[in-house]
Image (spheres, rainbow, N blue to C red):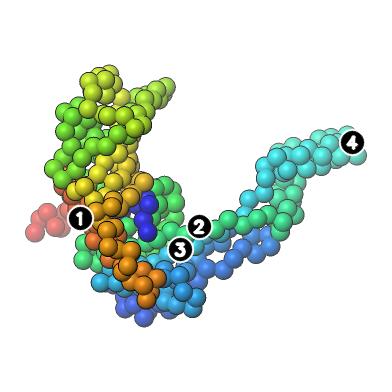
């Protein structure tokens, strides 16, 4: 259900009723790209059933799914046609179009080719944990997640504020210490993959894959100034993942100990409720444990009136 995640903290918020949210989601339901449209995004049924609810509540956990369709025209085709058009204009007028004029010709070419372009669809799961006051977005790219957050703020209303979850220790600083000491934080283990990068203009990089990290060489690289940008870890022997410097969780995988017996659960609903229960039940403690391992959540400065109280 979640292969990657970025986590956002919910600020003060008065949640709307599910029925009100359903109406708002229906007004922004996904529709496929038009003939000359490059991108379309909207909400689809999390359960995958046509004409079903666009928001699901499973054990008090709210689940949404955003569908995005994009159409791209091959760059080589555009370049070839643009060159032909520019050469033709130069032959007819004695001047080769440049700047704004050339850009307009390129846009005309793309516009003409779009109806024949093949669309590509992706879906992104979104989990709203009201008890923990967190929003978990199934993406590893901050740019993609922030675009979804913009949609969520508009959708959820009630003055909601969503901010990336921040911790007292940056992931890079903590990962460097764990690797230097050859010791993972309590409840976690370090696996066999990491990337170290020099934080300068050269960005020299060292990657380890399927290789033990409990070696002096790793600590030496860190001593020379390289910082971890990602490290593979396992939580509680149950969930493996890769932690990044941006506090994204990538390559999330529920291990066999979690999945044993789950294959026969939830046959009546295609396993959706069981999948949600398992995913939220495993990722919730992982996120809490990771925040603790990173020194706790970073406290924001209180406003002056709060400090004076």
Direction left: furthest residue: 309
**Residue 257's spot in the image, x, y percent?**
24, 53
Check contact, mark 4 vs mark 2: CB within 8 A: no
Determine the secondary structure under disc 1: helix
Determine the secondary structure under disc 4: helix
Q: Residue at x 27, y 29 (%)?
A: 212
Determine the secondary structure under disc 2: strand
Give the CA separation, mark 3 to mark 1. Answer: 25 Å
Which numbered disc, 4 or 2, marks the residue that appears first in the sequence? 4
> Could you tell whether 102 is left or right of 274 in the image?
right
**Residue 18's spot in the image, x, y percent?**
34, 77
Check contact, mark 2 vs mark 3: CB within 8 A: no
> Could you tell whether 101 is left or right of 6 in the image?
right
**Residue 306's spot in the image, x, y percent?**
14, 57
**Residue 69's spot in the image, x, y percent?**
56, 59
Give the CA separation, mark 1 to mark 2. Answer: 28 Å
């Amino acid at each position: 259900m979640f292969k990657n995640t970025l986590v956002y903290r919910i600020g003060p918020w008065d949640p709307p009723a599910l029925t009100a949210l359903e109406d708002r989601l229906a007004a922004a339901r996904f529709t496929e790209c038009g003939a000359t449209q490059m991108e379309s995004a909207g909400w689809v049924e999390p359960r995958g059933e046509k004409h079903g609810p666009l928001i699901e509540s499973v054990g008090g956990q709210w689940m949404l799914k955003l569908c995005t369709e994009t159409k791209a025209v091959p760059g080589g085709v555009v370049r070839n046609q643009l060159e032909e058009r520019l050469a033709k204009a130069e032959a007819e007028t004695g001047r080769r179009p440049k700047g704004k004029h050339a850009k307009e010709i390129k846009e005309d070419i793309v516009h003409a080719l779009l109806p024949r372009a093949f669309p590509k669809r992706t879906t992104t799961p979104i989990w709203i944990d009201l008890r923990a006051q967190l929003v978990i977005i199934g993406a590893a790219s901050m740019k993609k997640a922030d675009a979804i957050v913009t949609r969520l703020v508009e959708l959820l209303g009630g003055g909601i504020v969503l901010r990336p979850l921040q911790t007292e220790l940056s992931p890079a600083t903590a990962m460097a210490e764990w690797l230097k000491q050859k010791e993972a934080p309590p409840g976690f283990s370090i696996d066999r993959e990491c990337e170290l990068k020099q934080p300068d203009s050269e960005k020299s990089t060292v990657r380890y894959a399927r290789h033990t990290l409990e070696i002096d060489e790793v600590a030496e690289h860190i001593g020379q100034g390289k910082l971890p940008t990602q490290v593979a870890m396992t939580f509680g022997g149950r969930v493996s993942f890769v932690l990044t410097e941006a506090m994204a969780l990538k390559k999330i995988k529920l291990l066999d100990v979690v999945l044993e017996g789950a294959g026969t659960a939830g046959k009546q609903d295609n396993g959706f409720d069981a999948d949600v229960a398992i995913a939220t039940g495993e990722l919730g403690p992982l996120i809490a444990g990771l925040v603790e391992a990173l020194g706790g959540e970073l406290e924001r400065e209180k406003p002056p009136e709060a400090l004076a109280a």
